[in-house]
């Protein structure tokens, strides 16, 4: 794996030097806990040798029975019901925070201040101020910090970035991104609908992903004009938002997200148009990138055939990968950077990215509330 | 063809009563002139019997040699170099205005005031004020007036409207429309880049189509927040615009258009999400409508199989139609309404639609200029 | 339009020399009659100037009322109820035979022997012997003869042929062609189910099209192994056939057709694999060709952007054409060859192609009946 | 997970009874070794609780350095260079044979006769005779035996089988299957090109998968007519084959496979047409099934939304899975059947399936060699 891609070269020889271990402590055992546990386990043998060998030390959750079951299922050595025990655990060297948004700030800061590297789910904080506090406090400790914008680790997204960096698309004129899901009509009360826990609705949950790829692929956003919609009476957070964005580079476009797109399961779709070419993507077909080089037609590139650095880990061409493998790539990158003492960026998102992302989210909310274009500080 | 669809029932018997003629005078012989001439010729035998039998009387253009050649090619009985002669021609009963935008107002009003029915290309005027003037002056004469928003006559669009009217999609939450072309990087000086001739750029040319289908399918737009972009230095009109829209119904979405989407030839794409289902469309595959009924998956409906009222004119199922056939449908509808003295709407766009469309365009420009949300009057 | 493509250069100047006329007599007024009448009318102004200006002289059919209505609808100067009158009509210079298969041989031969050029629907005869008789008798008269394999005139098919001729696909290994329709389960008694009228079922109707493109794109078929199926009890002809084919060139593949593919309207699909690239096509998306150049991914080429010789006739890029336009291309080619006294091939199919096609059909039937591989003579 | 699907119900409670272990011995550490090792590791926590908890006891390979590295990487307790040691190892209770085809018979039979359950890669033997010998010898021991036709464990394939069993497609008329890869033009000498090691070429490698799904979805094949092609001079095995098949049920179709389809990476594509509906599939988009219910259009069903029994193991809807997960499903099914002493069929393929598959392969080769239809015994 070449250095240009930000990944370590994989050893191929039969002989492997001793692989140093790293102890992992995890907060949360639901969707993200499962995905991250799977990620640590898989990277330990799929991308051989791993930069560090993860040891699943301890997992924290408030429901003792549930967290105990999760520990057994995923192979954590122990479980705790108070995240402070994770922070205090000397064997935990990496703190993985997959808890709800209101549990991002305090545990993450505490872990960093206890000298542990940290990875925190997105959005980093519930607003830009909280995100800034997390970033500044953690940055001051000197530990490695990652904000889990996992879609940077889709092979097709990396291929897109390669094409953009190589100038294959020329000057960029447009970014159009939308994240469409359909489950918002539910009557279930989940934490994602509670403003004090989630901070925002579709913006923080889905919109942050679109904003992150917009920043990763096109650059910083200069200004937004937006509206939000809450279709369910009485719901505290946005069900959808629509925004027009201007990038610092002069590119313009739209960023949208909704939980009310019937029939769309996980349709994170984006398109970029440049003076020499265009690319388009849909997360529901995450193995494919549509590429126009400005001559005839869009190619449907199966990423296995085009993007070898990631693909070495997996299977013969055309044997497609799944959503979970993005997490494997992401956690591998984190461990590689810790092992080599290398910066996480530009491919891995840091807490600074989490903060800059939150600035855009706040601007969207402000623009929607005030009915005017808002410039990002 | 059933009345519900706004189309005449086609006679099937061998015997056909005398078909009354209608004399057509046309302004313009370029792209739109060719498309409309073809439309009149085709409808005279494809949708048998035609409601009126078009007679191609006269065609006007400033270049004598070119307009003479066009007259011979398309079978007009005569040609003129001054549109006033068309207006004065007693054999012309229908005035078809396919000239550039600055030639919409005066000739169209003059023709109507001379008692001729009128069809005028979109945008109706170069701004809302001019459009309002055209509408009011023509409406006062009592002639039939049509604004040529031909994409209402795509079978897939009609099928979409049927589904929406039947309530199959439930309450509508989102409309997302974009019209992407790529030819804007040209150095050629065409009238579409001249503000005095065109009024606006991508907005008037492409955006009006998106706005029209938004209005036709979802309803009136209440407010917009927008930005425009001119990528070519020195160009007077917008190369692209991006807007966020709120509908009177409570639906929200985006409307965009650009001439700088490399690789996209005629990608007028839109998606509507409702509480019970969703539909999606791309003009580059105009024979297909994507339909989710809220259960598993989107169907790719080949419109020949689903939408019989239009399809009767054409071929066996699966033998697809082309872009030009929308014009055939449109002109047929116009002649049918003239013949039966029936209102053009809701399926045919009138000059009132041209005006209401222009209000949205003006609001987009105003919002872009002032950086605030603009409410449509 | 360049000579390499087998088409005439279109005049562009306003001035056009006198266009010589050609009188057309047509047998049949159903599906093919409508498609061909439309073709003659459209080519007279779309591909300007036409090589010859078609005059619709006379149309023949047994039902006086129906043929009289068709004459009026399509603009034929007169109608007759006995095809012999067409043959005897001195104003008829081109005889267009769109009648059922049992009416191909006698009228076509008679017309040719009366000195008229002839175009006959496919299959040429009901078997190879009848096809051979037609070919030999007509060839002896010296008139121009075309067998109406219209799918050679799909722009995407021409683009495919260009790529193949240019060697872009390298050595050809595979042709896989299938023509899938769904209407075979009907209880209606149509002439296509009557062996004495049709000769065969899916083979003659749909299979001949696949065989023709196999020959046009890949070359002569050397041997076949096949089976046929008749799903409806009591039906005289095949509902479907499946065959394995070996080409003289060494390529191998399959040719299939069925009227029992529920959900498939007009799915004539084929794929060609060569040592350097591959191409794939589906008639339900006839404006698109899928092209792999052996590097990453298949391009979806919208033919408007790639294939200019045909496209000049039509609209701006991305404004797609329909099925009927293939007939316009085909009849234009026929008139151009008559006007210039040029050979019809390789792009236009002659009666020799009709005969060679029938040899393959007969071999398929023989192989199916005898359970062994059959070598084409 | 319901019993109808052949899968165990997954426990959901936090409390899990003791999970009995099963010791696994594996022959081979290349592509299939990696895929199966990954499968055992993943099923131990993804489908919780696993029916048996796999213990990776020992792995065998001739290259001591390589097999030692594989053992370390995948976590086998030990490694050996002679498969007989696996057979003799009392801790090995399940023998997983992923070796080349010439190493299927002897080790598999020996393992079974030593009382170990066995799973063997496809094709079972190098021809029907060898396959029959393996089946009979292993069947006689009473152990559980699985032939690794993993594509039965694609969720879309299971969904297809559900639709077929429910009669949703009506009477089946057609099966059309093809497995297209492109790597055959390589000059590399791999065991797959050596007749003594592989038995056959594209037939045994790819064709067996198509035959297996044909049998699983449509039923037994009664007769074949075929040809084979070897494009590379001097190569001992087939590079491609083409065959026409008749099923016992009266359905007809084609089965094809090639290693010379430039641009196709892993395109295992099939379509089934029935009197009430049709389904179509492409392994390069393995999360999707195309379904026509005989009314308008094919649905693109994302299997996550439709097929819950498998999906419970994975992620929220629309978060797609990859190729490797088929192996997880397959091995889970094997362990569940061993644990519950239940028959492997109909969803799991047994050695009898391996043998019946080989009968079809032999018939294809015989038909190709003799140029006649061959009836399957």
Image: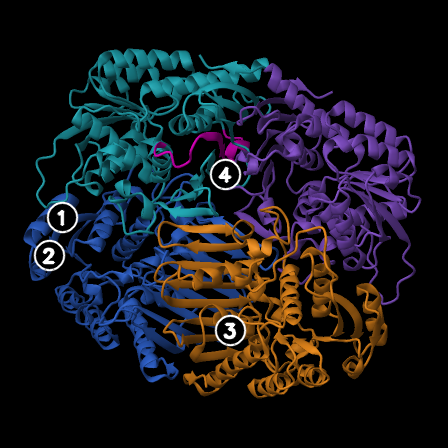
Chain colours: A blue, B orange, C purple, D cyan
Numbered label attached to residue A61: 2
Question: Magenta stretch containing residue D173, yes or no?
Answer: yes
Q: Are marks 2 and 1 in contact (CB under 8 Å)?
A: yes
Going 89% across and 53% down the picture, which residue do you hit?
A: C21
Mark 4 neighbour class, 10 Å CA radius: few under 14, some 14 to 19, many 20 or more = many
Badge 3 element: helix
Circle 4 chain: C
Report whether residue B181 is seen: no
Distance from disc 4 to disc 2, alpha carbons, whole Å, reads: 53 Å
Q: Is residue A284 left or right of residue B34?
A: left
Q: Quadrant of the C terminus of chain C?
A: top right
Q: Residue C179's x, y, as percent?
A: 59, 37
Where are the magenta residues, as a range? D165-188
Badge 1 element: helix
Report whether residue D77 is seen: yes
Q: Which residue is mark 3?
A: B211
Numbered label attached to residue A70: 1
Question: Magenta stretch containing residue B294, yes or no?
Answer: no
Q: Residue D75's x, y, as percent?
A: 22, 36
Q: Is residue A64 above or below residue D195?
A: below
Mark 1 neighbour class, 10 Å CA radius: few under 14, some 14 to 19, many 20 or more = many
Viewer-side residue, A343 vs D233: D233
Distance from disc 3 to disc 4, alpha carbons, whole Å, reads: 38 Å
Mark 3 neighbour class, 10 Å CA radius: few under 14, some 14 to 19, many 20 or more = many
Viewer-side residue, A344 vs D7: D7
């Amino acid at each position: 794996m070449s250095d240009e891609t930000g990944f370590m070269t994989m050893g191929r020889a039969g002989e492997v030097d001793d692989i140093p271990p790293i102890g992992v402590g995890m907060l949360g055992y639901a969707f993200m806990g499962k995905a991250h546990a799977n990620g640590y386990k898989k990277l330990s043998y799929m991308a051989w040798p791993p930069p560090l060998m993860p040891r699943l030390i301890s997992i924290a959750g408030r429901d003792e029975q549930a967290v105990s079951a999760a520990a057994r299922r995923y192979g954590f050595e122990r479980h705790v019901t108070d995240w402070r025990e994770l922070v205090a655990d000397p064997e935990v060297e990496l703190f993985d925070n997959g808890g709800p948004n209101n549990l991002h700030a305090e545990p993450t800061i505490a872990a960093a201040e206890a000298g542990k590297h940290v990875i925190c789910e997105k959005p980093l904080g519930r607003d830009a101020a909280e995100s800034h506090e997390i970033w500044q406090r953690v940055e001051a400790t000197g530990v490695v910090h990652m904000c889990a914008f996992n879609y940077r680790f889709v092979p097709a997204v990396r291929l897109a970035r390669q094409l953009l960096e190589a100038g294959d698309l020329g000057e960029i004129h447009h970014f159009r991104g939308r994240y469409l899901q359909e489950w918002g009509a539910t009557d279930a009360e989940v934490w994602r609908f509670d403003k004090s826990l989630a901070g925002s609705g579709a913006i923080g949950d889905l919109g942050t992903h679109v904003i992150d790829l917009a920043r990763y692929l096109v650059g910083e956003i200069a200004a937004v004009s937006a509206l939000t919609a809450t279709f369910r009476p009485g719901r505290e957070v946005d069900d959808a938002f629509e925004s027009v964005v201007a990038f610092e580079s002069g590119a313009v476009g739209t960023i949208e997200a909704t939980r009310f797109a019937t029939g769309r399961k996980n349709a994170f779709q984006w398109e970029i148009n440049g003076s020499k070419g265009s690319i388009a993507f849909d997360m529901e077909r995450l193995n494919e990138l549509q590429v126009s080089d400005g001559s005839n037609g869009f190619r449907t590139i199966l990423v296995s055939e085009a993007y070898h650095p990631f693909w070495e880990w997996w299977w013969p061409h055309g044997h497609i990968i799944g959503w979970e493998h993005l997490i494997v790539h992401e956690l591998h990158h984190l461990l590689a950077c810790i092992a080599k003492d290398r910066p996480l960026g530009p491919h891995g998102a840091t807490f600074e990215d989490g903060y800059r992302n939150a600035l855009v989210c706040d601007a969207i909310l402000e623009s929607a509330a005030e009915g005017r274009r808002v410039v990002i500080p």
